[in-house]
Amino acid sequence: MRDCVAFLLAGGMGSRLNILAKTRAKPAVPFGGNYRIIDFTLSNIMHSGIDQVGILTQYQPYSLMQHIRSGEAWDFIGRSRSARILPPSTGINASDWYRGTADAVAQNLNFAKRFNARQVLVLSGDHIYHMDYRPMMRFHKKRKADITVAMMHVPWRDTKHFGIATVDRDQRILDWQEKPDLAKNNLASMGVYVIEMKYLERVLQNAKGFDFGKNIIHDAVINDRVFAYPFDGYWADVGTLRAFWNSNMDILRRDSGLNLCQWHVRTNLDDEGHVADRLPTRFGKNAQIKNSLISFGCFVDGQVIHSILSPGVRIEKGARVIDSVIMHDVVVKQKAQLTEVIADKRAYFGAQSEIGVGEASQPNEKFPKHIFTGLTVIGKAAQIPAMTKLYRNTIIEPFCGKDVIAAQGLHVGSYVKQRRVKNAVPLTENNFS
Protein backbone atom coordinates (compact mmCIF):
# COMPACT_ATOMS: atom_id res chain seq x y z
CA MET A 1 0.00 0.00 0.00
CA ARG A 2 2.99 2.29 -0.38
CA ASP A 3 1.50 3.82 -3.53
CA CYS A 4 -1.52 5.05 -1.53
CA VAL A 5 -1.78 8.05 0.80
CA ALA A 6 -4.76 8.52 3.12
CA PHE A 7 -6.43 11.85 3.80
CA LEU A 8 -8.45 11.73 7.01
CA LEU A 9 -11.02 14.54 7.19
CA ALA A 10 -11.26 15.55 10.85
CA GLY A 11 -12.09 19.24 10.83
CA GLY A 12 -15.84 19.23 11.20
CA MET A 13 -17.62 21.38 13.76
CA GLY A 14 -19.99 18.61 14.81
CA SER A 15 -22.77 21.07 15.58
CA ARG A 16 -25.49 18.40 15.99
CA LEU A 17 -23.48 16.89 18.86
CA ASN A 18 -24.21 20.18 20.57
CA ILE A 19 -22.31 20.75 23.83
CA LEU A 20 -20.21 17.58 23.36
CA ALA A 21 -18.45 19.35 20.48
CA LYS A 22 -18.42 22.85 21.93
CA THR A 23 -14.73 22.79 22.88
CA ARG A 24 -13.44 19.93 20.70
CA ALA A 25 -13.63 18.69 17.13
CA LYS A 26 -16.26 15.99 16.60
CA PRO A 27 -13.67 13.24 15.90
CA ALA A 28 -12.10 13.99 19.32
CA VAL A 29 -15.31 13.28 21.27
CA PRO A 30 -14.81 10.34 23.68
CA PHE A 31 -16.53 7.12 22.63
CA GLY A 32 -16.88 3.61 24.00
CA GLY A 33 -15.13 4.17 27.30
CA ASN A 34 -11.43 4.44 26.44
CA TYR A 35 -11.63 5.68 22.87
CA ARG A 36 -12.31 8.74 20.77
CA ILE A 37 -14.35 8.67 17.57
CA ILE A 38 -11.32 9.16 15.31
CA ASP A 39 -9.60 6.06 16.74
CA PHE A 40 -11.75 3.79 14.59
CA THR A 41 -10.66 5.22 11.24
CA LEU A 42 -7.04 5.58 12.37
CA SER A 43 -7.05 1.92 13.40
CA ASN A 44 -8.53 0.92 10.04
CA ILE A 45 -5.72 2.78 8.27
CA MET A 46 -3.10 1.09 10.44
CA HIS A 47 -4.52 -2.43 9.97
CA SER A 48 -4.77 -1.85 6.20
CA GLY A 49 -1.02 -1.29 5.92
CA ILE A 50 -1.20 2.32 4.73
CA ASP A 51 2.02 4.09 5.70
CA GLN A 52 1.16 7.77 5.25
CA VAL A 53 -1.87 9.62 6.56
CA GLY A 54 -2.60 13.33 6.48
CA ILE A 55 -5.15 14.44 9.11
CA LEU A 56 -7.03 17.53 7.96
CA THR A 57 -8.14 19.60 10.94
CA GLN A 58 -9.83 22.96 11.31
CA TYR A 59 -12.42 23.45 14.07
CA GLN A 60 -11.14 23.32 17.69
CA PRO A 61 -8.11 21.17 16.77
CA TYR A 62 -6.22 21.26 20.07
CA SER A 63 -7.69 18.17 21.77
CA LEU A 64 -7.40 16.21 18.53
CA MET A 65 -3.76 17.20 18.09
CA GLN A 66 -3.00 16.28 21.70
CA HIS A 67 -4.64 12.90 21.20
CA ILE A 68 -2.95 11.98 17.91
CA ARG A 69 0.44 13.59 18.60
CA SER A 70 2.90 11.99 16.16
CA GLY A 71 0.72 8.92 15.57
CA GLU A 72 2.79 6.55 17.69
CA ALA A 73 -0.29 4.93 19.26
CA TRP A 74 -1.21 3.62 15.79
CA ASP A 75 2.39 2.75 14.85
CA PHE A 76 2.78 5.72 12.50
CA ILE A 77 6.42 6.22 13.46
CA GLY A 78 9.78 5.62 11.84
CA ARG A 79 11.29 6.54 8.51
CA SER A 80 8.57 5.06 6.32
CA ARG A 81 5.39 5.74 8.34
CA SER A 82 3.88 9.00 9.52
CA ALA A 83 0.67 10.71 10.60
CA ARG A 84 0.73 14.46 9.95
CA ILE A 85 -1.71 17.09 11.15
CA LEU A 86 -2.58 19.31 8.17
CA PRO A 87 -4.39 22.53 9.18
CA PRO A 88 -5.72 24.97 6.56
CA SER A 89 -3.21 27.19 4.79
CA THR A 90 -4.64 30.17 6.60
CA GLY A 91 -3.88 33.66 5.46
CA ILE A 92 -5.66 36.99 5.36
CA ASN A 93 -8.66 35.75 3.37
CA ALA A 94 -11.60 33.68 4.56
CA SER A 95 -11.10 31.48 1.49
CA ASP A 96 -7.88 30.17 3.01
CA TRP A 97 -10.00 28.01 5.34
CA TYR A 98 -11.35 24.68 4.13
CA ARG A 99 -14.57 25.35 2.27
CA GLY A 100 -15.54 21.69 1.91
CA THR A 101 -14.16 18.17 1.77
CA ALA A 102 -12.77 18.48 -1.76
CA ASP A 103 -11.23 21.87 -1.02
CA ALA A 104 -9.51 20.42 2.07
CA VAL A 105 -7.85 17.73 -0.06
CA ALA A 106 -7.03 20.21 -2.82
CA GLN A 107 -5.12 22.41 -0.37
CA ASN A 108 -2.99 19.44 0.69
CA LEU A 109 -2.26 17.58 -2.54
CA ASN A 110 1.44 18.35 -2.13
CA PHE A 111 1.42 16.02 0.88
CA ALA A 112 0.40 13.11 -1.36
CA LYS A 113 2.85 14.15 -4.10
CA ARG A 114 5.75 13.95 -1.63
CA PHE A 115 5.19 10.21 -1.40
CA ASN A 116 4.60 9.64 -5.14
CA ALA A 117 1.07 8.43 -4.45
CA ARG A 118 -0.80 6.77 -7.29
CA GLN A 119 -4.05 6.57 -5.38
CA VAL A 120 -5.54 8.75 -2.65
CA LEU A 121 -7.82 7.27 0.00
CA VAL A 122 -10.22 9.91 1.38
CA LEU A 123 -11.81 9.07 4.74
CA SER A 124 -13.92 10.66 7.44
CA GLY A 125 -12.82 10.86 11.06
CA ASP A 126 -16.32 10.75 12.57
CA HIS A 127 -17.64 7.30 11.65
CA ILE A 128 -17.66 4.10 13.71
CA TYR A 129 -16.79 1.03 11.63
CA HIS A 130 -14.17 -1.64 10.96
CA MET A 131 -12.84 -2.01 7.44
CA ASP A 132 -9.75 -3.35 5.71
CA TYR A 133 -9.25 -0.96 2.79
CA ARG A 134 -7.02 -3.34 0.79
CA PRO A 135 -9.87 -5.32 -0.88
CA MET A 136 -11.42 -2.00 -1.90
CA MET A 137 -8.11 -0.93 -3.44
CA ARG A 138 -7.92 -4.20 -5.41
CA PHE A 139 -11.53 -3.72 -6.55
CA HIS A 140 -10.66 -0.19 -7.70
CA LYS A 141 -7.60 -1.29 -9.69
CA LYS A 142 -9.32 -4.30 -11.27
CA ARG A 143 -12.05 -2.09 -12.69
CA LYS A 144 -9.61 0.63 -13.76
CA ALA A 145 -11.78 3.10 -11.93
CA ASP A 146 -11.21 6.82 -11.62
CA ILE A 147 -13.16 6.89 -8.34
CA THR A 148 -14.46 4.08 -6.15
CA VAL A 149 -16.97 4.84 -3.39
CA ALA A 150 -17.61 2.47 -0.47
CA MET A 151 -21.38 2.03 -0.19
CA MET A 152 -23.94 0.15 1.85
CA HIS A 153 -27.70 -0.23 1.98
CA VAL A 154 -29.44 1.94 4.56
CA PRO A 155 -33.10 2.16 5.64
CA TRP A 156 -35.14 4.10 3.10
CA ARG A 157 -36.11 6.68 5.72
CA ASP A 158 -32.41 7.60 6.10
CA THR A 159 -31.57 8.07 2.41
CA LYS A 160 -32.10 11.85 2.65
CA HIS A 161 -28.90 12.08 4.71
CA PHE A 162 -26.56 10.41 2.18
CA GLY A 163 -25.24 10.37 -1.33
CA ILE A 164 -27.35 7.70 -3.08
CA ALA A 165 -26.26 5.63 -6.09
CA THR A 166 -27.87 3.43 -8.72
CA VAL A 167 -25.43 0.84 -10.14
CA ASP A 168 -25.22 -1.77 -12.89
CA ARG A 169 -24.23 -5.44 -12.52
CA ASP A 170 -20.54 -4.56 -12.44
CA GLN A 171 -21.15 -2.00 -9.66
CA ARG A 172 -20.51 0.95 -11.95
CA ILE A 173 -22.46 3.95 -10.73
CA LEU A 174 -25.04 5.09 -13.28
CA ASP A 175 -26.84 7.75 -11.27
CA TRP A 176 -26.02 9.83 -8.19
CA GLN A 177 -28.35 11.77 -5.88
CA GLU A 178 -26.87 13.88 -3.10
CA LYS A 179 -29.12 13.80 -0.02
CA PRO A 180 -32.35 13.45 -2.04
CA ASP A 181 -35.83 14.14 -0.72
CA LEU A 182 -37.07 11.24 -2.85
CA ALA A 183 -34.38 8.60 -3.40
CA LYS A 184 -34.27 6.22 -6.36
CA ASN A 185 -32.31 3.65 -4.36
CA ASN A 186 -31.10 3.02 -0.81
CA LEU A 187 -27.44 2.33 -1.64
CA ALA A 188 -25.65 5.01 0.37
CA SER A 189 -22.14 6.46 0.40
CA MET A 190 -20.03 5.83 3.51
CA GLY A 191 -17.75 8.78 2.77
CA VAL A 192 -14.86 6.45 1.84
CA TYR A 193 -13.29 7.17 -1.55
CA VAL A 194 -10.38 5.74 -3.55
CA ILE A 195 -9.31 8.18 -6.26
CA GLU A 196 -6.56 8.03 -8.86
CA MET A 197 -4.01 10.71 -8.09
CA LYS A 198 -3.59 12.05 -11.64
CA TYR A 199 -7.34 12.11 -12.09
CA LEU A 200 -7.83 13.89 -8.76
CA GLU A 201 -5.35 16.63 -9.65
CA ARG A 202 -7.15 17.33 -12.92
CA VAL A 203 -10.65 17.24 -11.45
CA LEU A 204 -9.83 19.50 -8.51
CA GLN A 205 -8.39 22.13 -10.85
CA ASN A 206 -11.70 22.28 -12.74
CA ALA A 207 -14.10 21.66 -9.86
CA LYS A 208 -17.29 23.75 -9.75
CA GLY A 209 -17.73 23.28 -5.99
CA PHE A 210 -15.94 22.28 -2.82
CA ASP A 211 -17.44 18.94 -1.74
CA PHE A 212 -16.82 15.40 -2.93
CA GLY A 213 -20.38 14.12 -2.75
CA LYS A 214 -22.21 17.20 -3.98
CA ASN A 215 -19.75 18.24 -6.67
CA ILE A 216 -16.89 15.87 -7.54
CA ILE A 217 -18.71 12.52 -7.43
CA HIS A 218 -21.91 13.90 -8.92
CA ASP A 219 -20.10 15.27 -11.98
CA ALA A 220 -17.73 12.29 -12.34
CA VAL A 221 -20.61 9.82 -12.65
CA ILE A 222 -21.66 11.52 -15.88
CA ASN A 223 -18.24 11.63 -17.53
CA ASP A 224 -15.86 9.14 -15.90
CA ARG A 225 -15.45 5.65 -14.43
CA VAL A 226 -17.01 5.67 -10.96
CA PHE A 227 -17.75 2.43 -9.09
CA ALA A 228 -19.48 1.41 -5.86
CA TYR A 229 -17.61 -0.95 -3.55
CA PRO A 230 -20.18 -2.94 -1.51
CA PHE A 231 -19.80 -3.05 2.28
CA ASP A 232 -22.04 -5.06 4.60
CA GLY A 233 -20.46 -4.65 8.04
CA TYR A 234 -21.28 -2.32 10.92
CA TRP A 235 -21.04 1.37 10.07
CA ALA A 236 -22.47 4.36 11.91
CA ASP A 237 -22.33 8.11 11.46
CA VAL A 238 -22.37 9.41 15.04
CA GLY A 239 -23.09 13.00 14.07
CA THR A 240 -26.20 13.40 16.22
CA LEU A 241 -26.69 12.95 19.96
CA ARG A 242 -29.10 10.04 19.47
CA ALA A 243 -26.81 8.30 16.96
CA PHE A 244 -23.86 8.79 19.32
CA TRP A 245 -25.82 7.25 22.20
CA ASN A 246 -27.12 4.40 20.02
CA SER A 247 -23.66 3.42 18.82
CA ASN A 248 -22.33 3.41 22.37
CA MET A 249 -25.23 1.15 23.35
CA ASP A 250 -24.43 -1.09 20.35
CA ILE A 251 -21.16 -2.00 22.07
CA LEU A 252 -23.27 -3.72 24.72
CA ARG A 253 -25.54 -5.54 22.24
CA ARG A 254 -24.11 -8.90 21.19
CA ASP A 255 -25.83 -8.92 17.80
CA SER A 256 -25.03 -5.32 16.78
CA GLY A 257 -21.85 -6.11 14.83
CA LEU A 258 -19.81 -3.56 16.81
CA ASN A 259 -17.09 -5.58 18.54
CA LEU A 260 -14.23 -3.60 20.08
CA CYS A 261 -12.16 -6.68 20.88
CA GLN A 262 -12.37 -8.23 17.42
CA TRP A 263 -11.76 -4.89 15.74
CA HIS A 264 -8.50 -4.31 17.63
CA VAL A 265 -9.12 -0.57 17.92
CA ARG A 266 -6.07 1.39 19.06
CA THR A 267 -6.09 4.60 21.07
CA ASN A 268 -3.68 6.93 22.83
CA LEU A 269 -3.89 5.84 26.45
CA ASP A 270 -1.96 8.82 27.80
CA ASP A 271 -4.51 10.43 30.08
CA GLU A 272 -5.05 14.18 29.91
CA GLY A 273 -3.94 15.80 33.17
CA HIS A 274 -2.67 12.58 34.75
CA VAL A 275 1.05 12.28 35.45
CA ALA A 276 0.81 8.58 36.38
CA ASP A 277 -1.27 5.55 35.42
CA ARG A 278 -4.74 5.29 36.90
CA LEU A 279 -5.49 2.77 39.61
CA PRO A 280 -7.13 -0.53 38.64
CA THR A 281 -10.92 -0.57 38.55
CA ARG A 282 -12.35 -1.18 42.02
CA PHE A 283 -15.74 -2.52 43.09
CA GLY A 284 -17.28 -1.93 46.53
CA LYS A 285 -19.30 -4.55 48.38
CA ASN A 286 -22.56 -2.95 47.17
CA ALA A 287 -21.61 -2.90 43.48
CA GLN A 288 -24.02 -4.47 40.98
CA ILE A 289 -22.98 -4.52 37.32
CA LYS A 290 -25.16 -5.76 34.47
CA ASN A 291 -24.18 -5.78 30.79
CA SER A 292 -21.90 -2.75 31.05
CA LEU A 293 -18.44 -1.63 30.00
CA ILE A 294 -16.35 -0.40 32.93
CA SER A 295 -13.02 1.25 32.09
CA PHE A 296 -9.86 1.27 34.17
CA GLY A 297 -9.59 3.64 37.11
CA CYS A 298 -13.29 3.49 37.97
CA PHE A 299 -14.75 2.94 41.44
CA VAL A 300 -18.22 1.42 41.60
CA ASP A 301 -20.21 0.82 44.77
CA GLY A 302 -23.67 1.29 43.23
CA GLN A 303 -25.65 -0.18 40.31
CA VAL A 304 -24.50 0.14 36.69
CA ILE A 305 -26.95 -1.32 34.17
CA HIS A 306 -26.43 -1.37 30.40
CA SER A 307 -24.06 1.60 30.53
CA ILE A 308 -20.55 2.65 29.54
CA LEU A 309 -18.14 4.20 32.03
CA SER A 310 -14.96 5.91 30.83
CA PRO A 311 -11.80 5.94 32.96
CA GLY A 312 -11.93 7.46 36.44
CA VAL A 313 -15.71 7.43 36.95
CA ARG A 314 -16.94 7.15 40.55
CA ILE A 315 -20.34 5.60 41.32
CA GLU A 316 -21.08 5.75 45.04
CA LYS A 317 -23.23 3.54 47.28
CA GLY A 318 -26.90 3.44 46.38
CA ALA A 319 -26.44 5.30 43.07
CA ARG A 320 -27.96 3.84 39.87
CA VAL A 321 -26.76 4.43 36.33
CA ILE A 322 -28.97 2.97 33.59
CA ASP A 323 -28.65 3.11 29.78
CA SER A 324 -26.09 5.90 30.03
CA VAL A 325 -22.76 7.04 28.56
CA ILE A 326 -20.53 8.45 31.29
CA MET A 327 -17.22 10.05 30.32
CA HIS A 328 -13.96 10.49 32.21
CA ASP A 329 -13.82 11.36 35.92
CA VAL A 330 -17.55 11.87 36.40
CA VAL A 331 -18.72 11.57 40.01
CA VAL A 332 -22.15 10.15 40.88
CA LYS A 333 -22.82 10.62 44.60
CA GLN A 334 -24.86 8.41 46.91
CA LYS A 335 -28.40 7.46 45.82
CA ALA A 336 -28.27 9.56 42.63
CA GLN A 337 -30.28 8.09 39.73
CA LEU A 338 -29.24 8.51 36.05
CA THR A 339 -31.35 7.16 33.18
CA GLU A 340 -30.46 7.65 29.48
CA VAL A 341 -27.84 10.27 30.25
CA ILE A 342 -24.79 11.41 28.30
CA ALA A 343 -22.39 13.01 30.78
CA ASP A 344 -19.23 14.74 29.57
CA LYS A 345 -15.92 14.70 31.45
CA ARG A 346 -15.76 15.70 35.11
CA ALA A 347 -19.50 16.22 35.52
CA TYR A 348 -20.74 15.92 39.11
CA PHE A 349 -24.08 14.53 40.24
CA GLY A 350 -25.03 15.39 43.83
CA ALA A 351 -26.49 12.91 46.29
CA GLN A 352 -30.09 11.84 45.59
CA SER A 353 -30.25 13.80 42.32
CA GLU A 354 -32.54 12.29 39.67
CA ILE A 355 -31.51 12.70 36.05
CA GLY A 356 -33.69 11.67 33.11
CA VAL A 357 -37.04 11.93 34.91
CA GLY A 358 -40.49 11.80 33.31
CA GLU A 359 -41.66 11.35 29.73
CA ALA A 360 -40.11 12.91 26.63
CA SER A 361 -43.27 14.92 26.05
CA GLN A 362 -41.55 17.89 24.41
CA PRO A 363 -38.13 18.51 22.81
CA ASN A 364 -35.38 20.69 24.15
CA GLU A 365 -36.54 24.30 24.27
CA LYS A 366 -33.41 25.71 22.57
CA PHE A 367 -32.32 22.86 20.30
CA PRO A 368 -35.51 20.92 19.45
CA LYS A 369 -33.86 19.28 16.41
CA HIS A 370 -30.90 18.04 18.45
CA ILE A 371 -32.58 16.41 21.43
CA PHE A 372 -36.15 15.17 21.43
CA THR A 373 -36.10 11.40 22.11
CA GLY A 374 -35.62 11.43 25.88
CA LEU A 375 -31.88 11.79 26.42
CA THR A 376 -30.41 14.15 29.01
CA VAL A 377 -27.03 15.71 28.12
CA ILE A 378 -24.73 17.13 30.79
CA GLY A 379 -21.79 19.30 29.74
CA LYS A 380 -18.18 19.03 30.83
CA ALA A 381 -17.59 19.76 34.54
CA ALA A 382 -21.21 20.76 35.16
CA GLN A 383 -22.20 20.49 38.83
CA ILE A 384 -25.66 19.07 39.54
CA PRO A 385 -26.80 19.92 43.10
CA ALA A 386 -27.97 17.26 45.54
CA MET A 387 -31.66 16.28 45.31
CA THR A 388 -32.10 18.02 41.93
CA LYS A 389 -34.50 16.59 39.35
CA LEU A 390 -33.55 16.98 35.70
CA TYR A 391 -36.23 15.96 33.22
CA ARG A 392 -35.76 14.28 29.86
CA ASN A 393 -34.54 16.25 26.82
CA THR A 394 -32.63 18.61 29.11
CA ILE A 395 -29.23 20.10 28.21
CA ILE A 396 -26.87 21.53 30.83
CA GLU A 397 -24.07 23.64 29.39
CA PRO A 398 -20.44 22.87 30.31
CA PHE A 399 -19.10 24.33 33.59
CA CYS A 400 -22.54 25.21 34.97
CA GLY A 401 -22.23 25.61 38.74
CA LYS A 402 -24.62 24.31 41.39
CA ASP A 403 -26.00 27.78 42.09
CA VAL A 404 -26.88 28.35 38.41
CA ILE A 405 -28.74 25.05 38.14
CA ALA A 406 -30.48 25.46 41.51
CA ALA A 407 -31.90 28.82 40.39
CA GLN A 408 -33.64 27.36 37.31
CA GLY A 409 -37.27 26.39 36.91
CA LEU A 410 -36.58 22.93 35.50
CA HIS A 411 -38.96 21.05 33.20
CA VAL A 412 -38.97 18.60 30.30
CA GLY A 413 -36.72 20.05 27.60
CA SER A 414 -34.91 22.57 29.81
CA TYR A 415 -31.79 24.33 28.59
CA VAL A 416 -29.51 25.59 31.38
CA LYS A 417 -26.86 28.16 30.49
CA GLN A 418 -23.49 28.64 32.04
CA ARG A 419 -23.21 32.01 33.74
CA ARG A 420 -21.79 34.36 31.13
CA VAL A 421 -18.70 36.48 31.22
CA LYS A 422 -19.37 40.00 29.93
CA ASN A 423 -19.14 40.24 26.11
CA ALA A 424 -19.03 36.44 25.69
CA VAL A 425 -20.67 35.04 22.52
CA PRO A 426 -23.84 33.06 23.40
CA LEU A 427 -24.77 29.72 21.91
CA THR A 428 -27.48 30.09 19.28
CA GLU A 429 -29.07 28.05 16.51
CA ASN A 430 -26.76 29.90 14.12
CA ASN A 431 -23.58 28.39 15.56
CA PHE A 432 -25.21 25.13 16.72
CA SER A 433 -27.43 24.36 13.73
Image (cartoon, rainbow, N blue to C red):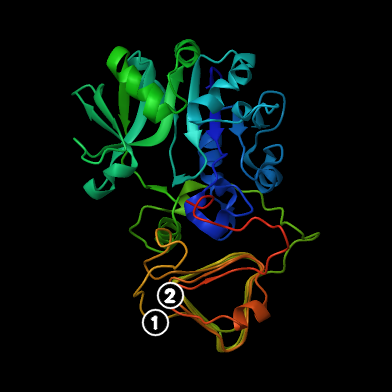
- Amino acid marked by disc 1: Gly
Q: Assign a secondary structure to mark 1.
A: loop
Instruction: Identify whether 140 is placed above or below 382.
Output: above
User: Do residues under tags 2 and 1 come within 8 Å of each other at their CB atoms?
Assistant: yes
What is the total number of numbered labels drawn onto the structure image? 2
Residue denoted by label 1:
358
- Say left or right for 293 vs 176: right
Residue 195 position by quadrant: top left
Front position in the image: 283 or 350 = 350
| Residue in the image at 28% along x and 47% along y | 158
Q: Assign a secondary structure to mark 2.
A: loop
| Residue in the image at 44% along x and 54% along y | 240
Query: Residue 258 bears which disc, if any?
Result: none
**Can residue 330 be seen here?**
no
Residue 233 position by quadrant: top left
What percent of the width, then of the height, locates residue 109? 58, 18
Residue denoted by label 2:
392
Instruction: Identify whether 337 is placed above or below 323.
Output: below
